Amino acid sequence: MPIKARYFVLGYGALELMLALDNNPGDNVAHFAHLGGMIFGYILLKKWQKDREVFY
């Protein structure tokens, strides 16, 4: 079943947010770190896109 990466990332971000807010003591994953990485990646991609437009 093919799916666009944009929708997969949005779904994964929503899942990470739900799991981060769910206080499960057996969960050993840094969900807010994943969300922070996603936000940083988005900002970095937008910066690269803006820098690329300057050269063309």
Image (cartoon, rainbow, N blue to C red):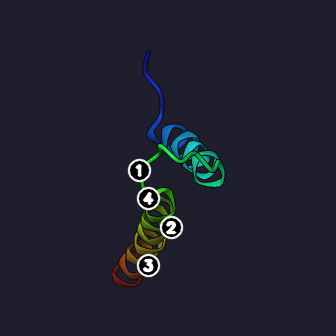
Q: Is label 2 or label 4 in front?
A: 4
Other-residue count near label 4 (Cα within 10 Å), few / some / many at <14 / 14–19 / ≥20: few
Earlier sequence position, callout 3 versus callout 2: 2
Earlier sequence position, callout 3 versus callout 1: 1
Mark 4, residue position: 30
What amino acid does circle 1 point to?
Asn
What amino acid does circle 3 point to?
Lys
Marks 4 and 2: in contact by CB < 8 Å?
Answer: no
Residue 49, image x and y in percent?
42, 71
> Mark 3 and mark 2: span between their CA atoms?
12 Å
Other-residue count near label 3 (Cα within 10 Å), few / some / many at <14 / 14–19 / ≥20: few
Marks 2 and 3: in contact by CB < 8 Å?
Answer: no
Mark 1, residue position: 28
Residue 24, image x and y in percent?
57, 45
> Mark 4 and mark 1: span between their CA atoms?
7 Å
> Mark 4 and mark 3: span between their CA atoms?
26 Å
Earlier sequence position, callout 4 versus callout 3: 4
Which is nearer the eye, 23 or 6? 23
Dot 4 falls on a residue whose secondary structure is: loop
What amino acid does circle 4 point to?
Ala
Q: Is residue 44 above or below residue 13?
A: below
Mark 2, residue position: 39
> Mark 2 and mark 4: span between their CA atoms?
15 Å
Residue drawn at x 40%, y 84% as measured from the top left: 54
Earlier sequence position, callout 2 versus callout 1: 1
Q: Is label 3 or label 1 in front?
A: 1
Residue drawn at x 51%, y 43% as measured from the top left: 12
Dot 3 falls on a residue whose secondary structure is: helix
Mark number for residue 47? 3
Residue 23, image x and y in percent?
63, 50
Which is nearer the eye, 11 or 5? 11
Marks 1 and 4: in contact by CB < 8 Å?
Answer: no
